[in-house]
Image (cartoon, helix red, strand yellow):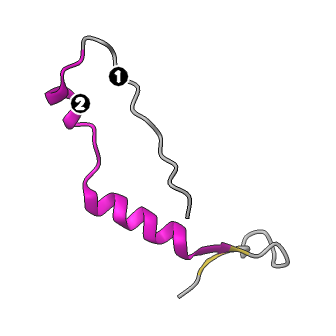
């Protein structure tokens, strides 16, 4: 899996303590990563059924 992330665009006046409140918890990031790894799309199925989560 590629290591791609979105960088936080902060103003030059913002302090590190202020930015800390905008970062998601590690457990949230881990959940999203696991979901992304297991999500699949099958274009042969009906569009409403195309996306599914594989075990």
Q: Is residue 38 above or below residue 7?
A: below
Say whether residue 39 is left or right of residue 7.
right
Query: What secondary structure prevails in the magenta region?
Result: helix
The circle drawn on residue 10 is 1
Report crowding for label 1: few under 14, some 14 to 19, many 20 or more residues within 10 A (C-alpha): few
Residue most toward the right?
Answer: 44
The tag earlier along the polypeptide, 1 or 2, is: 1
Mark 1 and 2 residues: CB-CB less than 8 Å, in contact? yes
Question: Horizontal and vertical percent for residue 35?
Answer: 48, 70
The circle drawn on residue 19 is 2
Q: Which quadrant is home to the N terminus?
A: bottom right
Of helix, strand and loop, which one carries label 1? loop
Of residues 7 and 55, the one drawn nearer to the viewer in this rendering: 7
Q: Which residues are magenta?
A: 14-40
Question: Horizontal and vertical percent for residue 52?
Answer: 63, 77
Of residues 31 and 49, the one drawn nearer to the viewer in this rendering: 31
Say whether residue 46 is left or right of residue 24.
right
Q: Residue at 54% of width from left, 76% of height from top?
A: 38
Residue most toward the top?
Answer: 13
The image quadrant that residue 34 belongs to is bottom left
Q: Is residue 46 above or below residue 16?
A: below
Of residues 51 and 18, the one drawn nearer to the viewer in this rendering: 18
Say whether residue 8 is left or right of residue 3.
left
Q: Is residue 11 above or below residue 42?
A: above
The image quadrant that residue 21 belongs to is top left
């Amino acid at each position: 899996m590629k290591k791609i992330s979105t960088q936080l665009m902060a103003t030059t006046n913002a302090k590190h303590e202020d930015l800390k409140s905008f970062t998601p918890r590690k457990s949230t990031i881990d959940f999203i990563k696991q979901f992304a790894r297991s999500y699949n799309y099958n274009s042969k199925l009906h569009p409403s059924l195309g996306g599914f989560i594989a075990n």
